[in-house]
Amino acid sequence: MADKFKSFNEGLNSPPSRLAAVTPSDTADIPQASRCINVATSGAVRLTTIAGDTETIFVAAGIVFPIRAARIWSTGTTATGIMVMY
């Protein structure tokens, strides 16, 4: 596959190039901080940002929600099919 943008540096305004499914955890951070998250089923997502803020947000299914998350908590999270993009 050709990628004419491969020689460019990625920035926070660039579209994400990687994705990973997340299993929410109250004890472990996600392996790579997100640039945004997406869920398959709408609901609450309790998360800790890379700045250390922990709050619960509502994320609608199929919508890319831009946030720099370090942890997705199991307790307080009702959304399912969580995917992080980075």
Image (tube, helix red, strand yellow):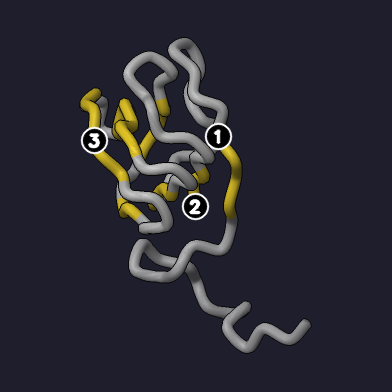
Q: Callout 2: 10 Å neighbours few (<14), some, many (20+)?
A: many
Where residue 74 sits, quadrant-wise, is top left
Q: CA distance from mark 2 to mark 3?
A: 17 Å
Q: Amino acid at mark 2?
A: Met
The residue mark sitting in front, 2 or 1, is 1
Dot 3: element: strand
Q: Are marks 2 and 1 in contact (CB under 8 Å)?
A: no
Q: Position of residue 38 (x, y in %)?
A: 43, 50
- In primary-sequence order, the first of circles 3 and 1 is 1
Residue type pointed to by label 1: Val
At 59% from the left and 56% from the top, the residue drawn is 18
User: Can you give x and y, in whole percent of width and height, for residue 52 in the image?
Assistant: 26, 26
Neighbours of disc 3 within 10 Å: few (<14), some (14-19), many (20+): few
Q: Which residue is mark 2?
A: 85
Residue under the image location 49 percent in, 52 percent down: 85
* 25 is higher (above) or lower (below) than 61: above
Name the residue located 44 percent from the left edge and 45 percent from the top edge. Answer: 39
Residue drawn at x 78%, y 82% is 1
